[in-house]
Image: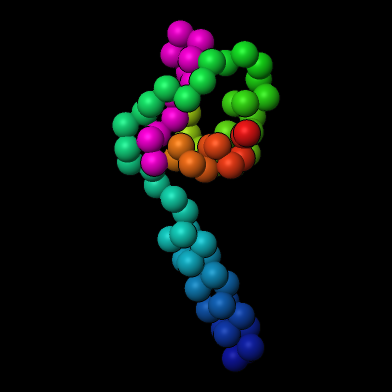
Amino acid sequence: MKKVLVLILCYIILFATLAACQKEYTEEYIEWGEKTNGNVAELLENNDIPYEIRDGIIYIPEDAFDKAIYCCA
């Protein structure tokens, strides 16, 4: 019984740590590039970078700019 409680406590701590480590982007959206193919949007989604497409142009949060360059260049 004690092992089960310790295991549950470890899972709770792990989940709380992972949830707290997720990046919340707060800056305004800036122009990042044109939507020429669906691959760019897929890469942004796979790397948890929020984006908006307005008039065929991709906008990302300003504080996600470096991460977008690393994942999609």
- Quadrant assignment, res 41: top right
Please say whether residue 47 is one of the residues in the magenta stretch.
no
Quadrant where the C terminus sits is: top right
Q: Main secondary structure of the magenta part?
A: strand
Closest to the observer, 47 or 8: 47
- Left or right relative to 66: residue 46: right
Closest to the observer, 23 or 66: 66
Above or below for 33 versus 20: above
Above or below for 61 versus 38: below
x%, y% of residue 9?
Answer: 53, 78
- Quadrant assignment, res 72: top right
x%, y% of residue 28?
Answer: 32, 31
The coloring applied to the image is rainbow
- Quadrant assignment, res 26: top left
x%, y% of residue 32?
Answer: 47, 25
Above or below for 70 versus 52: below
- The stretch of residues the image draws in magenta is 53-63
Quadrant where the N terminus sits is: bottom right
**Residue at image location 56% in from the left, 77% down from the top:** 10
Q: How many marks?
A: 0
**Residue at image location 44% in from the left, 50% down from the top:** 23
Task: Farthest residue to the top: give it.
Answer: 55
**Residue at image location 62% in from the left, 26% down from the top:** 40
x%, y% of residue 42?
Answer: 64, 29
- Left or right relative to 72: residue 56: left
- Left or right relative to 4: residue 34: left
